Amino acid sequence: MQAVYLEKTGDADNLKLVEQPVPQPGPGEVRIEVAAAGINFADVLVRRGLYQPMPELPLVPGLEVAGTIDAIGEGVTHLAGGERVAALVGQGGYARYALASAKGVVTLPDDLTFDLAAGLPVSGMTAYHLTHTVAAPQPGAWVVNYAAAGSVGSLVNGLAKTCGARVIALVGSEKKAARARELGADHVIDYRAHKDVAGAVLDLTAGHGADVIYNSVFGPTVRDDLKMLALRGHIVWYGIAGGLPNPKHLLVALMRRFTASPTFTFYHLITSVKHDARRHNEGWGRLFDYLLARQAELPLHGAYPLSRVAAAHTALENRETMGKLVLHPG
């Protein structure tokens, strides 16, 4: 079968298309014939050697897939060959066939396409947990949503609205601003046009600030987060697309907001999957309902063949995308 192989960290050209044996499912596993594989910024960080914890190389990247079950391992009784499914696979998604633990596989409603479903195990469930289990906003709360035209951010716009929140979307272009409005954002701030993002948020909220902040950038944005956070507000950092902040500056900024009684959360999806499987599985049904009712949307930016995986990574890395990128192994 064809697969994308990463032997050493570096630029996108290090992703090589190779022929590999078709994997065989072990006990508790299923094999999925992949129709679409989601591309995530976490894959870019792995390729660059910056992901934490960094997996061992070499590997086939790819955390999430959608397709059809084509073989079943010993002990799997609740799934059947031919079922349309999506799965969190850990690694190995950029391939014609991928193995998944049966516990991480979910059957798909008929009305969901494989391209959309390929973005749900990571992007979809991250957005769901941010807005419904980690830091669910109260009705009327002000929410700041970073990367609001990206894969997770696109969904957060709508999912936060299902809680009754007022959403301020942060984006990096006029085109992305228009998309965020289409997806339900009440206000949009183009951070490239505003030198003082925190000040703009405080103006929009009449000085109240953000009750909840969902931030996948981290790094240089942390001080803005702390400036615009409301009293007893909650910041969720769920990615490090912007790198790490200066530790000294971070400590000073944190101590300046000490009396505001803030809450800070670092969120990683795998923790939810491993340590609260029941709530995670229940979340799938609610996410499907929101998507089918068009209360939340995950637009598709583009679908690439495996042979163009480097181009897909480069587009994502350069912030040229809106919505979800997927690979088509077939």
Image: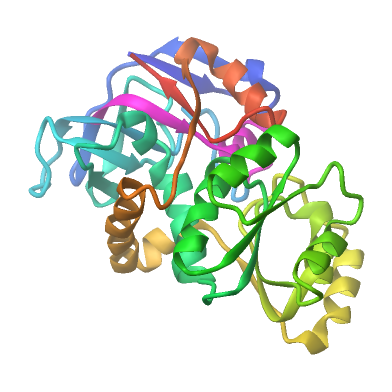
Residue at image location 38% in from the left, 61% down from the top: 274
Judge by depth and name the residue closer to the eye, 46 or 258: 258
Q: Position of residue 143 (x, y in %)?
A: 63, 65
Residue at image location 28% in from the left, 67% down from the top: 278
Q: How many marks?
A: 0
Magenta span contains residue 41? yes
Judge by depth and name the residue closer to the eye, 208 or 70: 208
Q: Quadrant of the C terminus?
A: top left
Q: Is residue 291 left or right of residue 149?
A: left
Q: Is residue 57 left or right of residue 256?
A: left
Residue 270 seen anywhere in this rendered image of the structure: no
Q: Position of residue 202 (x, y in %)?
A: 81, 68
Q: Quadrant of residue 214?
A: bottom right
Residue at image location 12% in from the left, 44% down from the top: 79
> What's the image's color scheme?
rainbow
Q: Is residue 145 left or right of residue 297?
A: right
Q: Quadrant of the N terminus?
A: top left
Q: Quadrant of residue 110?
A: top left
Furthest toward the bottom, the residue is: 259
**In this view, 233 is above or below 49:** below
Magenta span contains residue 47? yes
Q: Position of residue 78 (x, y in %)?
A: 10, 49
Q: Position of residue 294 (x, y in %)?
A: 38, 47
Range shown magenta: 32-51
**In this view, 296 is above or below 139:** above
Judge by depth and name the residue closer to the eye, 25 or 174: 174
**In this view, 118 is above or below 162:** above
Residue 91 seen anywhere in this rendered image of the structure: yes
**In this view, 316 is above or below 310:** below
Residue at image location 65% in from the left, 52% down from the top: 216
